[in-house]
Image (cartoon, rainbow, N blue to C red):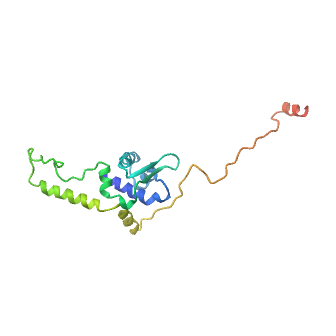
Amino acid sequence: KGRFAVTAMIDVAMHGGNGPVTLAAVSARQRISLSYLEQLFGKLRRSGLVDSVRGPGGGYNLAKASDQISVADVILAVDEPIDATQCGGRENCHDDHRCMTHDLWSALNSKMIDYLGSISLQKLVDDQLAKGVSVEEHPVKRAISSRPVLKPIKITAPNSVFALGAAFSK
């Protein structure tokens, strides 16, 4: 969950300059199931990391600046545990007692959280841009068209021979 969520958030951060990013577009670019993205983005929205925009031209925007969102924030938002212990921190993995390596795995948990918390979404975006990943600028399709709306012409001519005859009899 965490890897897909981070990947999708990088995509939203990179493509969000033109307005809300649709999950269908993220799905197509990153080859992640649309239904899975919908589940992840529901959790990301509830955690306050993204905002949703409804209606035509809608999608998702980052709720905070990309330099204010850490990888740890994203991973924890989608309920991905960052835990290397076998017991989930309950200290009961060896016959209801603490195992001999509990402190080792606990320390690793702390280091992982610190490391992931130190990396911002903006840093990952910058890394992608430095590698030459391009952000294709496609105009966002909106409900309002730039072309003028042509109204149908109302025809007042008679539509039959009888109506034509009646028009001349007046």
How far across and how far down the image is residue 89, in percent? 17, 49
Eyeballing the image, is 31 above or below 118?
above
- For this view, does 81 lie left or right of residue 170? left
- For this view, does 80 lie left or right of residue 134? left
Name the residue rendered at 35%, 53% in the picture.
5
- For this view, does 110 lie left or right of residue 97? right
Name the residue rendered at 39%, 60% in the picture.
66
How far across and how far down the image is residue 7, in percent? 36, 56
How far across and how far down the image is residue 155, in percent? 78, 40
Q: Nearer the viewer, residue 152 or 107?
A: 107
Q: Quadrant of residue 65?
A: bottom left
Name the residue rendered at 29%, 56% in the picture.
72
Name the residue rendered at 29%, 62% in the picture.
118
Number of numbered callouts drawn: 0
Q: Quadrant of residue 12?
A: bottom left
On-image quarter of the C terminus: top right
Considering every residue shown, the one lying at the far right of the view is: 169
Eyeballing the image, is 26 above or below 164?
below
How far across and how far down the image is residue 21, in percent? 46, 53
